[in-house]
Image: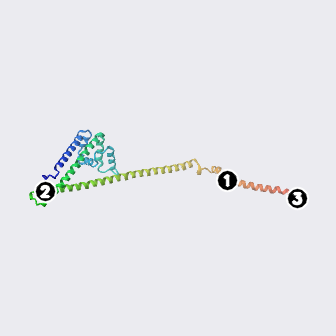
């Protein structure tokens, strides 16, 4: 089947060799660089950390790693916290220029993977077409056995790709969920802080009000003043002044009446 000139075998092999070279360059840089080599030597690197690096297209910055750790701390620490704490420690020990260089080499390898996968997909499509032609022209059993083994492997790769894509979609959905959950938690923390601040202000106002009342009571001020002090400011003094004014008016009327009496007496005598 691969003897057909239309099958891009060379293109596929070239893409594969380019991928191997890019992978080797990245791994060697990781093995020879202080900080990175300790990170790569961790037993969790390939099964856990490498998957995260591939997912986020490189080793995250220290700030990004801390934010990721914070996301898994709320509302309560989950099972990923110990792993993320190790990640933060590893990244903290890696020089920033080295981290950036490692990411550059890693993304080069990722690009080569994409080119290799594209070449493989093109080759698979051509092999499936050849298998259909062989079946159409009633090829021998031996040839069809080989053809079926090839096409079966292609079918398995397609199914594996479906699983990989579904996992990728799930990871993206989880990332969106984590982002929304983090934003919600931050908004909730902000609202809680604002409520706490309002409660503190209200408590202070209440305390100040109670303190003012206690002060007035102990110092006998305002509404807690003694009776004579109240009179001096108003109250009974106003009543006394009113009585004096009434009494004064009554006396004045009486005096006026008495002052008129002699005039009446003189007038009677003259008469």
Q: Is residue 244 left or right of residue 132?
A: right
Asked if residue 88 is positioned above or below residue 177 in the image, the reply reads above
Query: Can residue 120 be seen in this snapshot?
Result: yes
Q: Which residue is identified by label 2?
A: 147
Instruction: Using a 10 Å C-alpha cutoff, classify the residue at mark 1 as few (fewer than 14 neighbours), some (14 to 19) or many (20 or more).
Output: few
Q: Which residue is identified by label 3?
A: 267
Q: Nearer the viewer, residue 121 or 129?
A: 129
Q: Is residue 86 left or right of residue 191?
A: left
Percent from the top left, x then y, of residue 253?
A: 78, 56
Helix, strand or loop for disc 2: helix
Whole-Å distance between the Cαs marked 3 and 2?
161 Å
- Quadrant of the snapshot with the C terminus: bottom right
Q: Nearer the viewer, residue 8 or 166?
A: 8
Which sits earlier in the primary sequence, circle 2 or circle 1?
2
Q: Residue at x 70, y 54 (%)?
A: 242
- Mark 3 and 1 residues: CB-CB less than 8 Å, in contact? no
Instruction: Using a 10 Å C-alpha cutoff, classify the residue at mark 2 as few (fewer than 14 neighbours), some (14 to 19) or many (20 or more).
Output: many
Whole-Å distance between the Cαs marked 2 and 1?
121 Å
Query: Can residue 41 be seen in this snapshot?
Result: no
Which sits earlier in the primary sequence, circle 3 or circle 2?
2
- Quadrant of the snapshot with the N terminus: bottom left
The image quadrant that residue 101 belongs to is top left
Q: Nearer the viewer, residue 114 or 266?
A: 114
Helix, strand or loop for disc 3: helix
Percent from the top left, x then y, of residue 12?
A: 18, 49
Q: Which label sits in the foreground, 2 or 1?
A: 2
Percent from the top left, x then y, of residue 221?
A: 59, 48
The numbered dot on residue 238 is 1
Asked if residue 270 is positioned above or below residue 69 in the image, the reply reads below
């Amino acid at each position: 089947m691969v003897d057909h000139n239309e099958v891009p075998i060379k293109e596929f092999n070239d893409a594969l060799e380019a991928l191997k070279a890019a992978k080797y360059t990245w791994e060697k840089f990781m093995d020879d660089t202080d900080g990175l080599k300790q990170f790569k030597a961790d037993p969790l690197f390939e099964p856990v950390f490498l998957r995260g690096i591939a997912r986020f297209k490189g080793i995250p910055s220290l700030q990004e790693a801390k934010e990721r750790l914070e996301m898994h701390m709320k509302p309560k620490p989950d099972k990923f916290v110990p792993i993320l704490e190790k990640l933060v420690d590893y990244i903290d020990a890696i020089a920033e220029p080295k981290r950036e260089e490692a990411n550059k080499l890693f993304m080069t390898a990722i690009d080569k993977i994409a080119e290799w996968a594209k070449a493989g997909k093109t080759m698979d499509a051509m092999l499936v077409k050849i298998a259909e032609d062989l079946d159409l022209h009633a090829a021998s059993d031996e040839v069809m056995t080989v053809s079926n083994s090839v096409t079966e492997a292609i079918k398995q790769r397609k199914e594996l790709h479906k699983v990989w894509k579904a996992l990728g979609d799930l990871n993206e959905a989880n990332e969106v969920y984590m982002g929304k959950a983090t934003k919600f938690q931050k908004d909730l923390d902000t609202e809680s802080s604002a409520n706490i601040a309002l409660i503190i202000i209200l408590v202070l106002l209440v305390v100040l009000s109670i303190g003012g009342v206690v002060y007035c009571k102990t110092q006998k001020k305002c509404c807690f003043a003694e009776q004579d002090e109240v009179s001096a400011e108003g109250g009974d003094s106003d009543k006394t002044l009113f009585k004096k004014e009434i009494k004064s008016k009554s006396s004045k009327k009486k005096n006026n009446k008495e002052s008129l009496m002699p005039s009446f007496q003189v007038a009677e005598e003259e008469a």
